[in-house]
Amino acid sequence: MKLLSFKHQGRETWGAVVGDGVVDLGKAYPQHTTLQDYIASGDYLRAAQHVEGLAIAAKLAEITYLPVITRSEKIICAVRNYMDHHQEVLAAGMHRELSEFPPIFLRVWRSQTAHDAPIVRPKVSETLDWEGELAVIIGKGGRDIPESEAYKHVAGYSCYNDGSVREWQFHAKQIASGKNFESTGGFGPWMVTADEIEPGRALKLETRLNGEVVQSSHTGHMIFNIPQLIAYSSTIFTLSPGDVIATGTPAGVGWSKKPPRFMKPGDVCEVEIEGIGVLRNPIVQQE
């Protein structure tokens, strides 16, 4: 099942994709005000049953997409989590050793934007880079989750573009400042529920800029896999339903190219992940 947050006729709601349309589950089940609430209740496990008998509320072409989870408590992002990306970082002159533990940082929810919505290049930078990633949405919360139990805590998966404002990322040894400019992280178009993707399955990931493939890999190349990321993160925080883990990007980012290449106003960036779909964002300049 594909679940999403969207806006239609001036109203924010959430629902399920059926063919080329959406069923408004937010209207049918008003006790759950957001998709995050629905996930927290555990009712999403019965989403296929909840859709039965309900009419299509709108065509996909008629809605305004919202970030899949509109206000996650935590957006946890993995750093250099593909070996090929780690190697390209080294080749570009940044000498960092592989970590024994997953390097992570946090995004704020306002840094995200939806499918078909603009990624905004900030006034202060011309080094806005792409990073296509698999996003994991937490369904069942918990603390100190063992790796062996981790997949039981996954509600589903989505596409993510962890847009990076590079020179701000390099202002200090921590990188969060370059990762939290408003509307720089694409998230969508929807969440595919975990029952549709076999745990541990390697999913092809491709990022395209104006139709040109700039990243091509698969999620089996992660250094720290999904159970490891969940176990490590839940040792630090209590994971909550609707939390997001962006699992890192493969090689092919613009910063490492010679000469470097970055997203600019008028560009269109797409992240496609096998079994999930295509996240598409036009690039605009901050006003």
Image: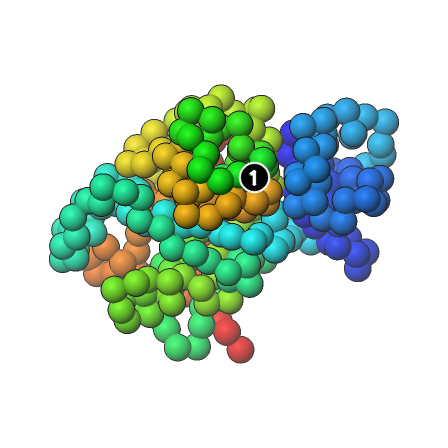
Tell me which amino acid carries mark 1: Gly
Relative image position of residue 198 (x, y in whole percent): 49, 21
**Residue at coordinates 55% horizontally, 59% vertically from top-left?**
109
> In the image, 94: left or right of 46?
left
Q: Is residue 234 positioned above or below 63 on the image?
A: above
| Front residue of 138 and 263 | 138
Image quarter of residue 121? bottom left
Q: How is the image coloured?
A: rainbow
Relative image position of residue 117 (x, y in whole percent): 58, 58
The residue tagged with tag 1: helix, strand or loop?
A: loop
How many numbered dots are placed on residues in this image?
1
Image quarter of residue 200? top left
**Residue at coordinates 58% horizontally, 35% vertically from top-left?**
140
**Residue at coordinates 41% horizontally, 65% vertically from top-left?**
264
Q: Which residue is mark 1?
A: 141
Task: Work out whether residue 142 can be spotted.
Answer: yes
Q: Is residue 28 positioned above or below 161 on the image?
A: above
